[in-house]
Each structure stands twice: as C-alpha cells, then as structure tokens.
Amino acid sequence: MFRKTEIANSPDVASIFDPAGSGAPTPGATTNVVHRPSLFATNPTALDLRPLVAVPARDEAERLPGLIRALAKQSWLRRGVARLDVVLILNNCRDDSLGAALREAEKHAGIALHAVTVAFEPVDAHAGSARRLALDTARALCPSDGSGVLLTTDADAVPANNWIEANLAAISQGADLVGGRLIGNVDEEALLGPAFLRRARDQQEFAMLSDQLTAIVDPLPHDPWPRHHDHTGASLAVKADVYDRVGGLPALPRREDLAFVTNVRSSGFKVRHAPEVIVEVSARLSGRAAGGMADCLKQWVKATQAGDPHLVEAPTAILERARRRRLLRTLGDCDAASLATAAMRLSILPADLHDSFGQLLSPQELVERFAPEAPDAIATVPVRAAIDELDGLIRRFGGASRAA
C-alpha cells in the first residue's frame, strides 16, 4: 500500500509492521505495551475505559501543535492513571509535520506520541488510508482486557477539554460508537464575512430541526433527543472490539468515516450523537481531503458571493425518510402477510428484504439499505422556508418548537 514506514520515538508501534519493511501491518502482531488485567466483567464505567487517539495528518506542521496542546489539556489526564496514547500517521508530508509534532509532544508529560511517517502510493494517498492505518495502529496498542476505546479526530481540530471524558461517559452508558458535535472556529469563520455567517447559522438551525423531527418520528432509545447529526472523522469514538467486528474503517478516498458509521449501525451496534462531545474544526478554505469540509466551505463562499439562494432538502423528504426508517424497524415482528403489505407500501420486493439464505435482514440492515442517510440530498427549498416548515411539523407531532 505504501513504500516505506519510518517510526519516530515509537518503540511500541515499530513491532506492528512487518520486518521486510513493506509497511503493511502484520496480522496478529503484538507490541510491547503492558497488558493490564481485566478491569470489569460486563458493564464498564468511564473509569474502566482506556482511550487511544488516532489522527491522520498531511502537511500539518502549523496545526498539529494546537491539536497536541488540546489533547494535553484533557480532563481525563487529571486522573493520573496513565499517559494518553496518541497515534499520528504522517502521510506523504512535504513539510516538517513530524518535527512540529515531536517538539510539541515533548512539552507535555501526559502525552505518549506514536508518530509514524508513511509514503503511500498515489492511488492510496488519501485520508481514508491514513485514518485506517492510524486506527489499526492504535488498536494494536490497546490493552487485552477489552477496555480499549479508539478515538479519532483531524490534525487541524481542537477538541474541548472534556472531549475524552465525554466520549467515555457515552460509551459507559451503552453506546458502541459516539459521534461528536462539530463547531467552527469563530475567528476563522468571521473572516469569511457576515453573509457566510448567516448562511452557516441558517444551516445549523435547519440541521438541528431536521434531527429533532427525525428523533420524534423515528425515536431511538440509545440516541434520544437532544442529539445532533455529526458523525465524521473529526470526532468519532468506538469500542475496540466493535471496530474489530465490523472489519475496521474502510480505506476509501472520501467519506470513509460515514461508511464506517454505516457499517457499525448495520451490524446492530448503537451509535450515540452526544451533544456534550464537542470539537472545534477549522474554517480554512485550503484543506487536505478532497470533498472535505474545506471544499464545502469554498462552495458556500462562492455561492454567497454569487448571491445564490440557500437551498436545502425538502422537509417532506426528511419526514418521509424518518417514517420509512421507523416502519423498517418494525418488520421483524411481522407475519408473512404483513411483511408483504409493508414491502408493497415501501416499494420493495419482499424477496429483497431477505438475505441469500432466505432470512429476513435485521432491522438495522434494512434501515441502512432501504432508508439510508442522504448527505447528497437534492436541495430544493429555501432554507428559511424549510426552517418554518420543520418548526410546524415538530409542533404537529408533539415536539417542543423553537418558538416554545
């Protein structure tokens, strides 16, 4: 996958890679991390869990010190139980990202930095490959007692001081994966102008009301309102055993994070969108990942400058998707006749509701297959009109409106 691997200040990571030097992680490889005895039998508490942070980076010498400083301020470190393992995959860097990270990490006794430099072949030189390698490397460093929790964020992000503790709290309360809430850097957003800020505020309100309506129509006990809609690579936390059971994060050139969350949910695991888990993200217009946040922001700026209307997905489409998801979750309790009726209502062939062995797919698989999220939904409705319509739908279905 990549030509060489260089380990810097990371003896624990070195043994993960094959001795031939190809850079491919060795299946079943172990490290010299001390494996602690089991801390819990069934229900872990946040105190029982061991976090490990995995970060992909490319030409981030300017931003990495800020991330490391934020990780060094984590309230979890105040327990004094252990240092925080931070795996940093520096892929195809042309700047001094390695030196910048090492110099900053040396200032913080609580940070155990595992810096790995790699040179991916062009076809694999993207965030998906780097994040996959970062998470796989962090997984190899996990204790063997099942307490490991893998957290990932971006090199230009700044997690809140309680980011780790808030993630671990959500995990200990039953979540298998936690998506963190993303907020833009206030100073950087301000530089984009007042028109951009209005667009950003409207988009945020639309997203919040969309998710509130969805939570009313398709309620999930493990992900109740209040919640948010973010589950991207800027803030994910997943139990290590869950990461294993879904085959890890797909090394895709874009949206590897969304594909991973889809795999987790379709496998029956619980995803929580915890509002108390917060990460500040950059509002820069020159990003590293194609199709990432920087590209989105550039499109917004261009549209704002051109005076284009701010259009969003129709609230009726959001409502229909939520209803469809709710119905799909009930199919496991249907008899053959009811199943056929439901399939007809959903415009699905009854045979397509089953696997190749004739077994009905799980509710989670049905939802992800026949009512997936729509990050590229066609935008047809002006945002302010959509906000008013969503507010009315929330009132209609018995939720507290924004005017309440």
Image (cartoon, rainbow, N blue to C red):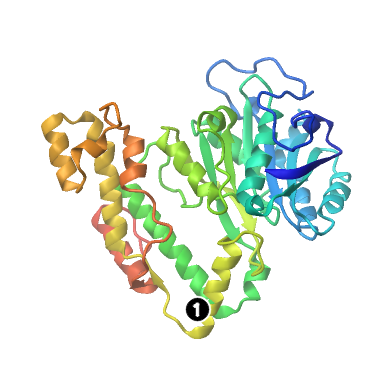
Q: Quadrant of residue 223?
A: top left
Q: Could you tell me residue 357's position as x and y percent?
A: 29, 26
- Residue extending farthest to the bottom is 306
> In the displayed structure, does residue 19 sit left or right of residue 212?
right
The residue under label 1 is 303
Q: Could you tell me residue 48's position as x and y percent?
A: 64, 25
Is residue 355 visible to us here? Answer: yes
Determine whether 218 is above or below 338 in the image. below
> In the displayed structure, does residue 309 sit left or right of residue 157?
left
Q: Quadrant of residue 24?
A: top right
Between 213 and 339, the one lying in front of the other is 339
Between 98 and 84, the one lying in front of the other is 98
Q: How many numbered discs?
A: 1
> In the displayed structure, does residue 212 sit left or right of residue 257?
left
Between 318 and 172, the one lying in front of the other is 318
**What amino acid type should be assigned to the residue bearing mark 1?**
Ala
Is residue 394 visible to us here? Answer: no
How many neighbours does mark 1 have within 10 angstroms: few (below 14), some (14-19), or many (20 or more)?
some
Determine whether 61 is above or below 200 in the image. above
